[in-house]
Amino acid sequence: MSVIALGINHKSASVALRERLAFTPERLPEALKTIQNDAGCDEAVILSTCNRTEIYCFGEQAKAQQVVNWLAKFHQVPSEELEQHVYIHQNIEATRHLMRVASGLDSMVIGEPQILGQVKQAYQQARGVGTVQTYFERMFQQSFSVAKQVRTETDIATNAVSVAYAAVTLAKQVFGDFKGKKVLLVGAGETIELVAKHIYEQGAKDIVVANRTLSRAEGIAEQFGAKVCALSQIAEEILTADVVISSTASTLPIIGKGLIEKVFKNRKHKPMFLVDLAVPRDIEPEVAELDDAYLYTVDDLQEIVASNMQARTEAAVEADQIIDGKASMFSDWLSSLDSVDLIKEYRTQSLAIKDELLVRALNQIQAGNDAETVLTEMANKLTNRLIHAPTSALKEAAESKNTEQLATMKTVLGIQ
């Protein structure tokens, strides 16, 4: 039996090649069915995300090259091109790779949580098509359990590793939580959208998105139940804001020291947390001189991110130790299945010999032959048939002076 994990990811292939090898939801069922027929996979799961395409295959006849050929054919990509970028893991290494992927250790950002959901979705889709049975059922469930253990027992996901998330984490440290707090987001690009997502997930409900183009702001606001306003209305909205996070493409500051001074006259020393993620700056650096204003720049956050990345890298070492142990346990279980099959086969073969000789003996007795003679003959033949293979193996080991094999066979045959 063989387990294969084969694929490409952000480290091994360009975006262009990853796009060509991606599986659309519409074609995934077809792919799962054809890989069973064409690549010798008794069980199969396909994981396809923006950063990776991976094929997990299990079967007695499964061969890595067959899977490579199938993947190249399915997407009409030359095998030679694919082979330059594909990675292949087999058996215990395949199991270990899946566990690392599910735990976020193989991601572009170490410890990112989205990948676990994507692996679970890939497993459920394969299960729905019928390409997950006993082996992958256990392997994937074990991987989900390991991913949960890694997140519980290590610091792999506790530190912010994006500037957007670092900004939200800092704000939460200042205020404790966002209940009853007003958040003003200035800009409507990808960074502000990511900030909005993180801060909404942390419990912020009173969010205002300010942007020069209102339609862009509305696109973000709709996702998180936020309000929108034009940049010209910032002075009104900032008056009651507790958190201000800005990231625009403006060449000049949008929020000046004078504006914040006016705001504070009406706020009765209520603190304001400001984060400037823009380069050039959106918020005049002199704002930091004001009492009750807590201003952080993108450089401040980069230091936090760098420190947290180091912490995640250290946590990844602990996570790998957990994964190594669990992968070995799964490999042992898989090996035990081979021994179970061998025992079944040996028992079936022995019972077949017994049945064959018993039928022959009963027929002879019914034909009037002496019962004692028939039984003696049956016992001799049964003994000879059962000891023939072990005797041949013993002779061969003795002739080749293989003492290790002789010792093993002595134990197996119960010879004192």
Image (cartoon, helix red, strand yellow):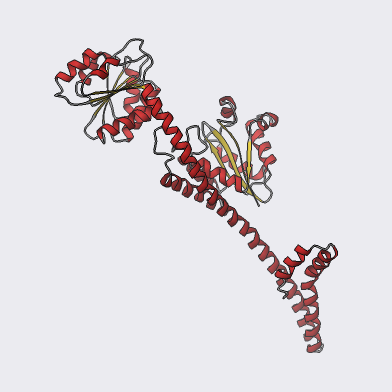
Residue, far top: 252
Locate the C terminus by quadrant: bottom right
Image position, residue 415 (x, y; %): 73, 74
Q: Residue furthest right?
A: 399
240 left or right of 191 in image: left
Above or below for 196 versus 315:
above
Q: Nearer the viewer, residue 63 or 392?
A: 392
Q: How many marks do you count on the picture? A: 0
Q: Position of residue 95 (x, y in %)?
A: 57, 47
Residue at point 25% right, 33% down?
175
Residue shown at 50%/35% (left/top)?
A: 107
Determine whether 232 is above or below 96 in the image: above
Image coords of residue 128 (percent x, y): 51, 46
Q: Quadrant of residue 227 in the image?
A: top left
With respect to residue 293, does 200 lie above or below? below
Q: Which image quadrant for residue 190?
A: top left
**Residue 204 visible to the viewer:** no
Please give the name of the residue rendered at 68% of the width and 69% of the height, measured from the top-left corner.
Answer: 347
What is the x, y in percent for residue 338?
65, 58
Of the pair 74 and 307, the residue shown nearer to us: 307
Q: Quadrant of residue 407?
A: bottom right
Look at the image and tell me whether residue 198 can be seen: yes
Lateral position of residue 240 relative to residue 67, left or right = left
Q: Is residue 60 above or below residue 106?
A: below
Question: Does 210 sit left or right of 304 as displayed?
Answer: left
